[in-house]
Amino acid sequence: MSALLQLDGVTAAYGAVEALRGVSVHVNKGEIVTLIGANGAGKSTLLMTIFGSPRARAGRVLFEGRDITAMPLHEIARAGIAQAPEGRRIFPRMSVRENLLMGAQAFGVDPGPGLEQAFTLFPRLKERETQRGGTLSGGEQQMLAIGRALMSRPRLLLLDEPSLGLAPLVVRGIFSAIRALNEQTGLTVLLVEQNANQALRLAHRAYVLVTGRITLEGTGAELLARPEIRDAYLGTH
């Protein structure tokens, strides 16, 4: 099976500090792949490097077999990759609907299908359609960030810590929506997440990142069963 996304020996740094060291991962079409690791392991940097900020100092990033390593950020997005970033970064003074429309207008796509998808996936957004984004709860803002990313009709969705700061019940709802999105539309998802238990149960495959290097990979079930993963990330023995 050919990979939709492939990182081949990617090294990335902030100044003299290397955040990724020869990282190789791949994401096949239709998969949910998760990347777990401790704070500072380089998880968010990996997603940012896909978008070219920072640029990979070594190695290549391929999307649909095309080298996008040095491609401008807006062209990477137009190629079919979207991201719901850590911290959500919604527009707090805009309404829910206006936030969603921004996700479509930047790419010149018809917003109708995207709005329908966002409101079906997250009915709460429909209920809050005219409400300012800044007045939403944390969970609702995360729904909005994901919905806005979907407005460009991407083929690959990058999710950075979607559970961060959310109550367990809300987290379960967010992860259920991601699973439904994948199962119903076939959308490919690369998920960076500290909630290893939820992420590994959701993922088809997973990687463990430790201080900028991939140390383990396998199916979500395989990694959940490994004692070292349970001890380090799940708090069980």
Image (cartoon, rainbow, N blue to C red):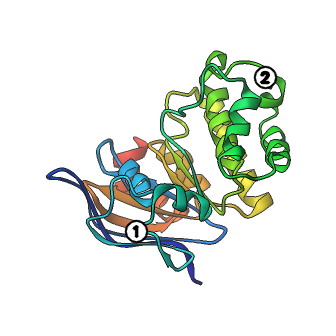
Q: Quadrant of residue 173?
A: top right
**What residue is rendered at 38% in x and 57% in y?**
49
Cα separation between marks 1 and 2: 39 Å
Q: Are marks 1 and 2 in contact (CB under 8 Å)?
A: no
Q: Crowdedness of circle 2 by 10 Å Cα count: few (<14), some, many (20+)?
A: some
* Residue corresponding to mark 2: 128
- Given residues 208 and 84, the one toward you in this image is 84
Q: Is residue 47 visible?
A: yes
**What residue is rendered at 39% in x and 67% in y?**
70
Q: Quadrant of the N terminus?
A: bottom right
Q: Quadrant of residue 155?
A: bottom right
Estimate the x, y position of residue 179 in percent, counting from the top left.
70, 52
**What residue is rendered at 61% in x and 18% in y?**
134
Disc 1 marks a residue whose amino acid type is: Thr
Estimate the x, y position of residue 139 in percent, counting from the top left.
63, 28
Q: How many marks?
A: 2
Q: Crowdedness of circle 1 by 10 Å Cα count: few (<14), some, many (20+)?
A: many
In the image: residue 93, left or right of residue 76: right
In the image: residue 92, left or right of residue 53: right
Q: Is residue 176 visible?
A: no
Disc 2 marks a residue whose amino acid type is: Arg
* Residue corresponding to mark 1: 69
Q: Which mark is residue 115?
A: none
Estimate the x, y position of residue 59 in percent, counting from the top left.
31, 73
Sooner in the amino-acid sequence: mark 1 or mark 2: 1
